[in-house]
Image (tube, rainbow, N blue to C red):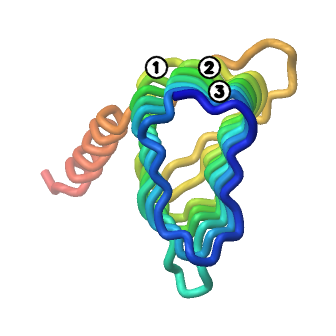
Amino acid sequence: ETIVGEIDLSSNDLLEKVSMNALKAHSDLLKITSNDFLADIFFTSLESVGGDVFIQSNDDDAGRGLINLQMPALVSVGGDLSVASNDALPSLFFPSLVSVGDSVQCDGNDVLESFCAPLLSEVADNFVLGTAPHLTTVCVDTEIVVGDIVNVNGDGISATNPKKSSDPLRWQLATTAQKKRRNWKRRRRKRERRIPT
């Protein structure tokens, strides 16, 4: 099934779940914002969105809100992919995502611990995972061509490249396994320095 035109589910005080599992393609804006009690979003067959995807501010003052976002088949987004200010969302996993036509903006997600998009290889503008104090895992297993700025800030994770040129930036985050291996080697060297001979 394909939907032409905007999908805008915003400011619905009673909305708890969005499930559009038959939707395969959407040609325009997909916006799900400011739904205080929305806990689950399921787009299990959605492969492409021609416009922006905004999933923002789905929480209430008590810290309840979006905890589950599933878009396992999503391959491409034509505009921005913005998942921001969802204060209860613990993880983001886009297993099939390859390209974003504008920016990836995932910031202000207070309890976000992991962002994984193992196949992501092209972001036309900015790649920002900022203001996520609990972010400990970023899984991007391929080299990403980023058109402008890379900014990743989390708990022990930091990568900033404020690039301002016309050439795309080729950038790769170390995978979780590589980071664990480097951390293990660092700890081992520290222990070896402390052992008296």
Residue drawn at (48%, 45%), measured in percent from left and top?
A: 20
Residue 52, how many percent across, how many down?
A: 72, 37
Q: Which residue is mark 3?
A: 100
N-term mark: 3 or 2: 3
Residue 65, how many percent across, how many down?
A: 51, 72
Residue 134, how many percent across, how many down?
A: 48, 63
**Direction from residue 173 to residue 126 in the image, left or right:** right
Q: Which residue is mark 2?
A: 122
Tell which of 132 and 57 is nearer to you: 57
Name which residue type carries label 1. Thr
| Rendered image: mark on residue 142 | 1
Q: In the rendered structure, are the residues bearing label 1 and label 3 in contact, judged by CB atoms less than 8 Å apart?
A: no
| Crowd class of label 3 (few under 14; some 14 to 19; many from 20; radius 10 Å) | many
- Given this view, does label 1 or label 2 mark the residue nearer the observer? 2
N-term mark: 1 or 3: 3
Tell which of 142 and 181 is nearer to you: 142
Residue drawn at (86%, 15%), measured in percent from left and top?
A: 166
